[in-house]
Image: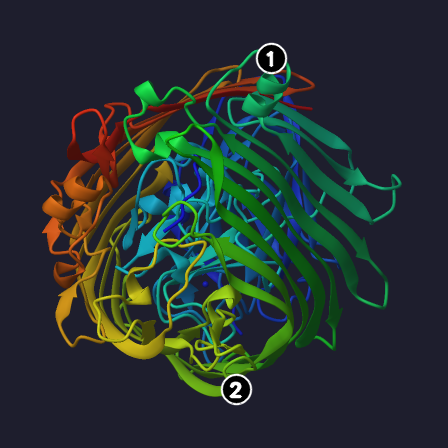
Amino acid sequence: MNKLFIARKIPGRIILVSAISLLTLTVYAQSITQVVRGKVFDGESQEPLAGASISIIGTDPLAGSISDSSGNFRFNKVFLGRYSFAVSISGYEPVIIPEVLVTSGKEVVLSIGLRQSISMLREVVIKSGTQKGKVQNNMAAVSARSFSVEETRRYAGGLDDPARMVAAFAGVTTGNLQDNAIVIRGNARKGVSWRLEGVEIPNPNHFAGGNVAGGGIVTVFSSQMLANSDFYTGAFPAEYGNALAGVFDMKFRNGNNEKRESAVQLGLLGIDVSSEGPFVKGKSATYLFNYRYSTLGLLAGLGLFNSPVIPKYQDLSFKLNFPTKNAGTFSVWGIGAIDHLMAKEISDSAKWETDWDRYRDDWNLHSGAAGISHKLPLGRSTYLNTTLMASRVSSVATIQRMNDQLSMEPSALLSDKSGRATASILLHHKFNPALSLRSGINYHRLFYNFDINNTINNEPGTLRNITRAKGESGFQEYYLQLRYDLNEKLSLSPGINAGYFEVGNEFSIDPRLGLKYKLTNTHTLGLGYGRHRQMEDLRIYMLERVYDGKVSYPNKNLKQAQAQHFIVSYDWLVSKNVRIKVEPYYQLLQKVPGIADSSYSMINFLQDWAFSDSLGNNSSGRNIGIDVTLERFLSNNYYFLVTASFFDSKYKAADGIWRDTRFNKQYVINVLAGKEFITRKGNVLGINGRINYVGGERHSPVDIERSVSEEKVYYNENRAFAQQLSPTYYFDITITYRRNRKKYSGVLALQLKNVLGSPSFYGYEYNFRSGKVEIEKEKMMLPVISYKIEF
């Protein structure tokens, strides 16, 4: 296995119940005010709602506004602080938008989708429901929640990274601290799909897949760009294909259409510059962009930072939005990253401790995705969303090894230049308040150019070509899902995802089903089922074999791995701010690729840049567990989130033996809490902490005798993942201080990950000095300091 040295290591007059007034806000008498505005619309048809009532809870006198014919509302002078907004209109279920932070640096622009009430026969009194954690896709019944941009900063250990932030959610575990890849309910990290603006994109992380497929050092996404986004951990709605474990459905917000605003941030992870506003004042077309350059890369370029491993990266994200009067809304968006990593060998052989000290890595990675989207209303109950997207990944790595004569020899020459062109069409139609349909087509063309060369078992002088292939292929997805509210209590969401994968000439039809039953106003039962598929990396299918001068591709007929998800969900809203959620689940994995007559299965895949084995769909697995969440939403300036997951993850490879999977840590417990202190001047001090306790890493036993004899680590794969390390605990802290001034706002942040220095496990290495096989662990505290100015 080749690894790159990434860091070496929700008719009738609706009455809002009096309970709303009990919600509190934090606001202090002061002279600085800010604009709060937004738009109210039908959450399904996207049609603007005129005449909606928006009020700021707790203000005296009560501050209120009414949405105009375009659904827009506005508060011109809102004092700084945190506020909850009550939104209602006849015929729709009222909602509460909780704890919105109003600062001096930027206007607050809210986007509020309401759900039409199916109660048309009588006057009803409906308690307003908070939108906290509610996903935007109403087809989702279980295992889904939304997250905000603010949470990626506020949650301790999040480091402004969605992947690291969701590690606090139930069902999610992480690996080592230097990588943001996540394990969802015992599944391999590569089983997570990333989407942006409704279409699938390549892994959006810097140094993507360097140590672990599915992750990287830090996300390419900037918090300046993101709108509220959705995260799924099982039984995904029908529109989500090519994923076995989970889905990130990321959204970019639109730029401010009235005022130009900017932000500059200087921090350990990078120097960010962002800007947004109308192209022409008074017009509706807007821009929004963020550019970042790695701080360590800049310091190294100036000669102020010297290290054997120097990661340099930069990224750009943007969205241009062009609303029209009669032709809908056009948007142009994209993300891109340029990464370079150099890891140097130790030239003095007397200082070598492990074999990695002999290696030099030089890795250049360019990745990006850009698209044009068009949303077109078709009457008052239907809209059509069309997207054209192109993505590109160019990964070129040269790995050399210093031999005993202190000369460099090639160990691996890896070139992967891949791309994708996607055409996506989504149609959403609301027949009536109780019945809606969501359907679409995704057509993907895949382009590849591989030149993979590697040594045999890392032996010097054995460099040979594994794959040299150039061409194109593709896959198609078709989906349809209905949501039918049979009555006020029961809703049903049947769906189907169908597809065709050209490489394996494989047709697929996968059913999806969601059900929600409201037992009482505060107790909800949910059921979810889905069959899901995912293809492997294209370079796996293009593996070459040469027999008697003839080239064959033994993996080209591989079928996609499958997973069936069965989920039960119980959600109890204990109070207006506290909820308990319990989700037992069972997952059956089928037709997973593996190596014949061995314990090897792609269920356990981490990363192998030069994978060279023939595979068959000969392994299976099962994940069973329960996720528990106790959450208090931010109110009265404090919040907490306690999650616990208990699971068992097993697999059976081609040898027919059931074993623990690599990711069977069996349990993970998170306790996350935070408190805000707001001064009379509107400044905000936030203190947040997180404790994470997780079962130990699993690994195969080391063949000590052979490893010592050959001075290289060999594992006993007949007893794959039979051993487990001790449990691990992590403690993270995030402290932020926002200082508001009349024309700007400054935010100082200190984010400390792994404050206690708990070690991360990386495997075993043979130590040349001691002559022994030693465990490879690293104790590391990751401090991230940043200062941002918004103006």
Q: SS for tag 2?
A: loop
The residue positioned farthest toward the top in the image shown: 304
- Please state which of residues 557 and 155 is positioned toward the viewer in this rendering: 557
- Please state which of residues 135 and 80 is positioned toward the viewer in this rendering: 135
Where is residue 621? Give x, y as percent: 23, 72
Relative vertical location of residue 295 with respect to residue 451 in this rendering, above or below: above
Q: Residues within 10 Å of mark 1 (few under 14, many from 20)?
A: few
Residue 241 in view, yes or no: no
- Please state which of residues 116 and 730 is positioned toward the viewer in this rendering: 730
Mark 1 lies on residue: 303
The amino acid on which the numbered mark 2 sits, given as a three-letter code, is: Asn
- Please state which of residues 773 and 635 is positioned toward the viewer in this rendering: 773
Where is residue 299? Give x, y as percent: 59, 17
Q: SS for tag 1?
A: loop
Q: CA distance from mark 2 to mark 1?
A: 53 Å
Relative vertical location of residue 168 with respect to residue 457 in this rendering, above or below: above
Residue 766 in view, yes or no: yes
Number of numbered callouts drawn: 2
Relative vertical location of residue 443 with respect to residue 224 in this rendering, above or below: below
Q: Residues within 10 Å of mark 2 (few under 14, many from 20)?
A: few
The residue sitting at 55% across, 44% down in the picture is: 397
Q: Give the side of residue 146 with respect to residue 415, left or right.
A: left
The dot on residue 505 is 2
